Amino acid sequence: MLIGNGWDLHKHSALKPMYLAGLEFDEEGFEGYSDGDIILHALCDALLGSVGKKDLGHYFPSKQPTQKGIRSTVMLEKVLEIIDYDKLKVRNVDITVISQRISISEKRENLEGSISKLLNIEDSKVNIKGKTADFLGLIGDKKASASLVTILLSLIHI
């Protein structure tokens, strides 16, 4: 068994649309060199960590102008290649979004469906939940939101 965890945090921005789990929502998005998708960034780091690879910033450095504005779905596709995803089987993905702004309960089904499609796994293997910061800090002040991801995988024996 292989386990990985990842997390990401971005400040909110009225200048960008919100992307979560590869889906666009008509809400304030996130500052970032890419589309700022906190769920997919944390997922990418969890996948990379599960097989002992470097973090997402190593593969997508913000100092490369060709990466500016890159969609996180493209980043995830590249990460899946890096980790030889076709040799792995996802057992489960557990995702927590910490935000005082984003209502996960309203989006949960769509978010879980998107992750299952992106990873080509059953919906039942994806769990997404929302938490608040009880009005404490950057997240509690509605200035930022974060995501935590834990993933459990196993090797496929060929």
Image (spheres, rainbow, N blue to C red):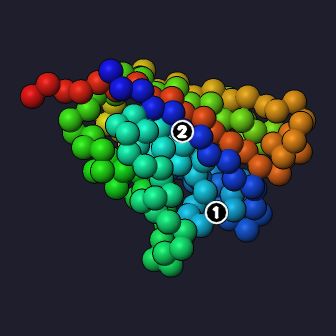
What amino acid is found at the position of numbered circle 1 in the picture? Gly
Mark closest to the chain's N terminus, 1 or 2: 2
Which element carries disc 1, helix, strand or loop?
loop
What amino acid is found at the position of numbered circle 2 in the picture? Gly
Look at the numbered discs 1 and 2 and tell me whether their residues touch, using CB distance below 8 Å.
no
Q: How many marks?
A: 2
Q: Is residue 132 left or right of residue 8?
A: right
Q: Around disc 1, counting alpha carbons within 10 Å, would you say few (fewer than 14), some (14 to 19), or many (20 or more)?
A: some
Q: Nearer the viewer, mark 1 or mark 2?
A: 2
Residue 82 position, x and y percent, is 30, 50
Residue 66 sits in which quadrant? bottom left
Q: Is residue 40 left or right of residue 96?
A: left
Which element carries disc 2, helix, strand or loop?
strand
Give me the C-alpha separation between circle 1 and circle 2: 17 Å
The image shows residue 70, relative to residue 144, as above or below, that is below
- The residue located at (72%, 35%) in the rendering is 98
Q: Is residue 55 left or right of residue 130?
A: left
Asked whether residue 14 is in view, the answer is yes
Q: Is residue 105 left or right of residue 50?
A: right
Q: Which residue is mark 2?
A: 6
Numbered badge on residue 32: 1
* Residue furthest out toward the left: 158
The image shows residue 5, relative to residue 145, as above or below, that is above
- The residue located at (26%, 32%) in the rendering is 88
Residue 11 sits in which quadrant? bottom right
- The residue located at (62%, 30%) in the rendering is 96
Front residue of 153 and 115: 153
Numbered badge on residue 63: none
Residue 64 position, x and y percent, is 49, 75
Residue 52 position, x and y percent, is 37, 39
- The residue located at (50%, 58%) in the rendering is 57
Front residue of 113 and 100: 100
